[in-house]
Image: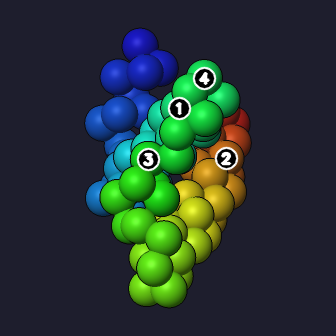
Amino acid sequence: MFYAYMVKNLTVLDKIALVLVIIGGLNWGLVGFFQWNLVEFIFGFSATGAFLAQLVYLLVGVAAIYVAVVMMKFARR
């Protein structure tokens, strides 16, 4: 019941943040199990690629904080 309520009330920003957190978690799982970084593979090791990879990491970190705050909001209900 709580899950249906929560999913029904997610905003577009909530969903984007959740997707970013899942992508970040999967990337860290790949790094932990296989020493293979998907973000670096996608963006490469050039200066531009390094900047884009750093931007992805920043967005995933901000999304994780956002999702933690949203989850606390839902937990109070």
Tell me the quarter of the image containing the N terminus. Answer: top left
Residue 23 against residue 32 in the figure, above or below: below
CB atoms of marks 3 and 1 within 8 Å: yes
CB atoms of marks 4 and 2 within 8 Å: no
Q: Measuring 40% from the left and 54% from the top, which residue is drawn there?
A: 41
Q: Tell me the quarter of the picture where residue 44 sits.
A: bottom left
Residue 5 is at least partly visible in this image:
yes
Q: Measuring 58% from the left and 63% from the top, which residue is drawn there?
A: 57
The single residue placed furthest to the front in the displayed view is: 46
Inter-mark Cα distance, 1 to 2 = 23 Å
The single residue placed furthest to the top in the displayed view is: 1
Residue bearing the label numbered 1: 30
Inter-mark Cα distance, 4 to 2 = 25 Å
Q: Earlier in the sequence, mark 3 or mark 1?
A: 1
Q: Amino acid at mark 1?
A: Leu
Q: Amino acid at mark 4?
A: Phe
Camera-side mark, 3 or 2: 3
Count how many numbered circles sit on residues in the image.
4
CB atoms of marks 1 and 2 within 8 Å: no
Instruction: Where is residue 4? Give x, y as percent.
Output: 35, 22
